[in-house]
């Protein structure tokens, strides 16, 4: 079995103005001219309308939602682990370290909400992620535990962000988007710093 991309990064001869908008979304004008450094962006540029709509929703979760930087990274990383998205894990674990998530916490994210490393709030967050990934089927006791920790807007952001980053994970895995050899040179936290 090959691990080659199923949908390859957009070749230069197919770059349109709309594709260049995708390249530039996070990386700016230089990417508009040279192409994005991110294989995700170069792959998404195969379908610019879908890419830009999806990126706008992701930008909301990363910059505008009620989620803290830590909560947002924990959501992405737990989802990446659950769905085997090595691309998502690789990039976001680097960004997580930049905002203070430790190597020990990264390993505990893989183990889930039962790991003794977690505070009540972190345990509740991981339980909300896992429950959402299980089809959103929370029993009343689990739901009551979540509402004791999170207000309504934050809980809605957690659930919807989990769904969004799950969709991203599925796409990355299905299209076999490859981690860039030089990802550490340009990847990092694009979201909130706190």
Image (tube, grey):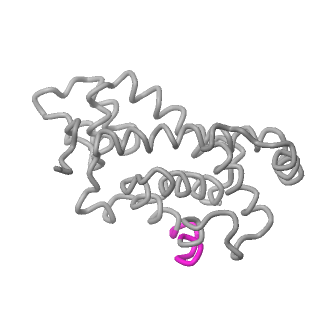
Left or right, residue 145 beside residue 81 = right
Left or right, residue 85 beside residue 180 = right
Q: Position of residue 136 (x, y in %)?
A: 68, 38
Whether 102 is among the magenta residues is: yes
Name the quadrant of the C terminus: bottom right
Whether 103 is among the magenta residues is: yes
The answer to which of 14 and 8 lies nearer the viewer is 8
Q: For the point 40% across and 58% down, which residue is it?
A: 91
The answer to which of 168 and 53 lies nearer the viewer is 168
Q: Position of residue 18 (x, y in %)?
A: 30, 23
The answer to which of 73 and 116 lies nearer the viewer is 116
Magenta stretch: helix, strand or loop mostly: helix
Q: Quadrant of residue 31?
A: top left
Query: Looking at the picture, does residue 168 appear above or below residue 107?
Result: above
The answer to which of 74 and 53 lies nearer the viewer is 74
Q: Start and end of the magenta stretch?
A: 97-106
């Amino acid at each position: 079995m090959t691990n080659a991309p199923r949908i390859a990064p957009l070749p230069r001869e197919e770059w349109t103005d709309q594709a260049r908008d995708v390249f530039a979304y996070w990386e700016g004008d230089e990417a508009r001219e040279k192409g994005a450094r991110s294989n995700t962006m170069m792959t998404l540029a195969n379908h610019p309308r879908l890419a830009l709509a999806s990126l706008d929703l992701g930008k909301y979760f990363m910059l505008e939602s009620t989620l803290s930087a830590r909560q947002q990274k924990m959501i992405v990383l737990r989802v990446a682990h659950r769905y085997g998205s090595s691309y998502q894990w690789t990039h976001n674990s680097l960004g997580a370290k930049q905002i203070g998530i430790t190597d020990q916490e990264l390993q505990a994210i893989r183990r889930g909400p039962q790991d003794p490393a977690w505070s009540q709030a972190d345990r509740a967050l991981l339980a909300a992620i896992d429950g959402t990934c299980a089809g959103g089927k929370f029993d009343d006791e689990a739901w009551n535990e979540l509402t004791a920790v999170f207000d309504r807007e934050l809980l809605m952001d957690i659930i919807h962000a989990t769904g969004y980053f799950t969709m991203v994970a599925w796409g990355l895995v299905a299209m076999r988007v490859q981690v860039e050899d030089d990802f550490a040179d340009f990847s990092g936290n694009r979201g909130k710093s706190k």
